Amino acid sequence: MFTKENLIDTLVHQGKRKKLAEEMAKLGIHNPNVLDAIRKIPRHWFFPKDFEQFAYRDAAFPIDYGQTISTPYTVAFQSQLIDINKDSKVLEVGTGSGYQAAILSEMGAELYSIEYIKPLLEEAAKILAEINPKVKLFHGDGSLGLPKHAPFDAIIVTAGAPIIPDSLKLQLKIGGRLVIPVGSEKENQQMIRITRKSNTEFSHEKFGDFKFVPLKGNQGWEI
Ligand code: SAM
């Protein structure tokens, strides 16, 4: 449970983040804005106080309701793939802990993030309010996107989908990117980037295997 006393950020935490960013760079993360955001955002704020010693390992960690905070490498890799700049309007599907949202907003994105588990969203909202109150949070089925706020420069899905939802592709601007893990419900998914070339044309690129909790909902797995 988040309380304001958790918001401590010591030189030790900062040193661990510097090391984590170096580790990410060695693994191939080269976008300086992503590495800067890893250095700046206190990942331990998104962990229960008793488990904060796990915050700066490159590992996923369970959060409530059977969900996870993705590995720092996965967060960095997806943040790099969506290829955003300070003016980008971005939708994140799967707010979870809020850590990825904090990273993207630190990179300058105008960020919309949607989560279908309300208590998770409420916890994330408390931490994000301290980091960047401009992040716009929504409760609902993100497999359908956020049509009222579309189009987006980029959409990042942080849960494993069975298919590439047309609903998300069609909420991209021309030139916009959708980064989404697609594959099995329980095993690995392949990271895919779709770029909207025109109203009707989309290109697809594949970026290897990852393992996410399932995307549920209308265009996801059954709830
Ligand atoms: N980005 C998150 C972070 O930084 O902690 C990682 C989140 S976790 C790997 C995936 C999240 O997607 C879970 O919180 C899950 O509840 C959420 N999710 C799954 N299906 C969803 C849907 N249809 N709409 C919105 N959120 C969904």
Image (cartoon, helix red, strand yellow):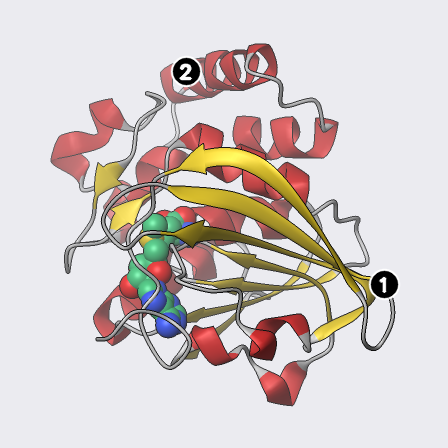
Left/right of residue 32 with respect to residue 1 in the rendered view:
right
- Residue in the picture at 65% in, 37% down: 80
Q: In terms of depth relative to the viewer, which is nearer, 116 or 134?
A: 116
Q: Quadrant of residue 170?
A: bottom right
- Residue in the picture at 22% in, 23% down: 53
Q: According to the image, label 2 marks what residue?
A: 16
In this view, 69 is above or below 177: above
Secondary structure found at label 2: helix
- Badge 2 crowding class, 10 Å Cα cut-off, few under 14, some 14 to 19, many 20 or more, is some
- Residue in the picture at 33% in, 77% down: 217
Mark 2 close to ligand 1, CB under 8 Å: no
User: Can residue 135 be seen by looking at this rendering?
Assistant: yes
Please state which amino acid type lies under the numbered disc 2: Lys
- Residue in the picture at 54% in, 77% down: 145
Left/right of residue 122 with respect to residue 17 in the rendered view:
left
Please state which amino acid type lies under the numbered disc 1: Lys
* In this view, the mark in front (2 or 1): 1
Quarter of the image that includes the N terminus: bottom left
Place of residue 16 in the rendered image (x, y in percent of width and height, measured from the top left): 41, 15
Place of residue 191 in the rendered image (x, y in percent of width and height, measured from the top left): 52, 43
- Badge 1 crowding class, 10 Å Cα cut-off, few under 14, some 14 to 19, many 20 or more, is some
Q: Work out whether mark 2 precedes mark 1 in sequence or the reverse, and give the earlier one.
A: 2
Left/right of residue 210 with respect to residue 187 in the rendered view:
right
Q: In terms of depth relative to the viewer, which is nearer, 87 or 158?
A: 158
Mark 1 close to ligand 1, CB under 8 Å: no
Residue 197 numbered mark, or none = 1
